[in-house]
């Protein structure tokens, strides 16, 4: 069994098709298919169930996937150790980010630019892989090195470090009956139509938990998968929302009302895996992000 075979296997498992894996690996599809056939012959088991559109892991494939990722990570750590002896930090860092970072409570581009000024030989890549819960799962499972996310509770296999916090506010359109209020409680919003993100998104999770704690079932009329669109639905008078100000202020016409009595808090966090050794490049980026949070907020950030 070769590292090349495991790289191809993991790429197919993560991308869902041979075609997408070929593009990711920059290999012709025939080479990808031949590599998997050779690996399956060597193992004496089929690793994928093939359909016309996608492939799915067999039981053998599911058993191999975490072990294959661990072997590939060990090979990266070995290269990393040699690079450190040669001098200068090198390597890669893959980060998953939630859409809420567009609100600038935490500027991911600024963090990457600052880090790469110090470590020009480290390549940082960023991808959106869905909501915060999905990002945490990708970090835990080794598909991502780190995550910038927001979740209100602990995540097994992932250490969460707070980077920023924002008390969430009621966002409503101009002319709304609550627009002139100095404050509003969640229990007063029973009849209001709401717009929010899908399940698993940080804003949605924090808001759902706050309403559940208040014993209120809200009327969720619109579910959209874009942070700025939530604020735009509010601005058009279609619904209200509970949002951190960094998102709500992306649409200036939205009015923000403080929530009294246990207002939910939106926390932007760094997610770091605890179930594997980190490469030097990943450790360095995580330390850089934590130090930046301390400098920016003036507190000792912790999960």
Image (spheres, rainbow, N blue to C red):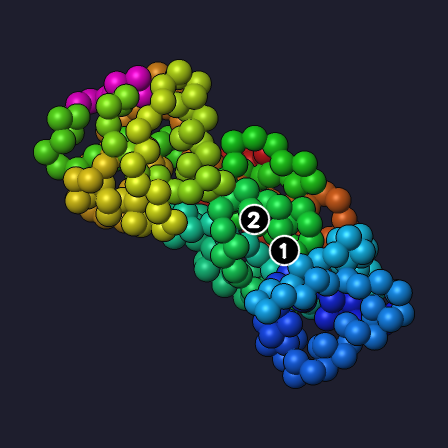
Residue at (51, 44) in percent of width and height: 132
Q: Is residue 84 visible?
A: no
Magenta-span inclusion, residue 237 = no
Say which mark, if any, is on residue 144: 1
Query: Distance from label 1 to label 2 (Cα)?
Result: 8 Å
Q: Position of residue 205 (x, y in %)?
A: 46, 34
Q: Nearer the viewer, residue 91 or 169?
A: 169
Residue at (39, 34) in percent of width and height: 166
Within-10-Å neighbours for mark 1: few <14, some 14–19, many 20+ = many
Q: Which residues are magenta?
A: 181-188
Q: Quadrant of the N terminus?
A: bottom right
Q: Is residue 181 left or right of residue 10?
A: left
Marks 1/2 in contact by CB < 8 Å: the verdict is yes
Q: Is residue 272 left or right of residue 259?
A: right
Q: Is residue 25 visible?
A: yes
Residue 132 sits above or below residue 34 on the image: above
Q: Earlier in the sequence, mark 1 or mark 2?
A: 2
Q: Position of residue 91 (x, y in %)?
A: 69, 67
**Does the magenta stretch mainly form a helix, a strand or a loop?**
loop
Q: Position of residue 226 (x, y in %)?
A: 36, 51
Report helix, strand or loop for mark 2.
helix
Residue under numbered circle 2: 135
Q: Nearer the viewer, residue 126 or 31?
A: 31
Residue at (35, 32) in percent of width and height: 168
Q: Position of residue 114 (x, y in %)?
A: 51, 60
């Amino acid at each position: 069994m070769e590292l090349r075979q495991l790289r191809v296997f993991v790429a197919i498992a993560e991308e869902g098709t041979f075609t997408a894996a070929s593009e990711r690996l920059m290999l012709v599809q025939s080479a990808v298919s031949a590599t998997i056939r050779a690996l399956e012959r060597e193992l004496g088991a089929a690793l994928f169930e093939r359909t016309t559109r996608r492939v799915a892991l067999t039981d053998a494939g599911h058993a191999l996937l975490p072990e294959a990722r661990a072997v590939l990570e060990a090979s990266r750590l070995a290269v990393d150790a040699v690079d450190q002896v040669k001098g200068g930090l090198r390597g890669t860092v893959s980060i998953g980010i939630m859409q809420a970072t567009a609100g600038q409570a935490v500027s991911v581009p600024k963090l990457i630019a600052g880090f790469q000024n110090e470590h020009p030989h480290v390549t940082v890549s960023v991808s959106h892989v869905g909501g915060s819960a999905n990002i945490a799962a990708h970090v835990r499972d080794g598909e991502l090195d780190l995550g910038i996310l927001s979740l209100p509770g602990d995540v097994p296999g992932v250490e969460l470090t707070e980077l920023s916090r924002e008390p969430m506010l009621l966002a409503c359109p101009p002319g709304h009956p609550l627009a002139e209020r100095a404050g509003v409680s969640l229990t007063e919003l029973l009849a209001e139509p709401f717009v929010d993100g899908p399940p698993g998104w940080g804003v949605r999770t924090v808001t759902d938990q706050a309403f559940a704690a208040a014993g209120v079932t809200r009327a969720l009329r619109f579910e959209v998968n874009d942070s700025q669109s939530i604020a735009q639905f509010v601005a058009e008078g279609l619904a209200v929302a509970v949002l951190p100000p960094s998102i709500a202020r992306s649409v200036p016409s939205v009015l923000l009302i403080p929530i009294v009595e246990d207002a939910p808090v939106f926390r932007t966090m760094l997610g770091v895996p605890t179930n594997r050794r980190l490469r030097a490049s990943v450790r360095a980026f995580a330390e850089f992000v934590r130090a930046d949070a301390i400098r920016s907020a003036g507190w000792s950030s912790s999960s």
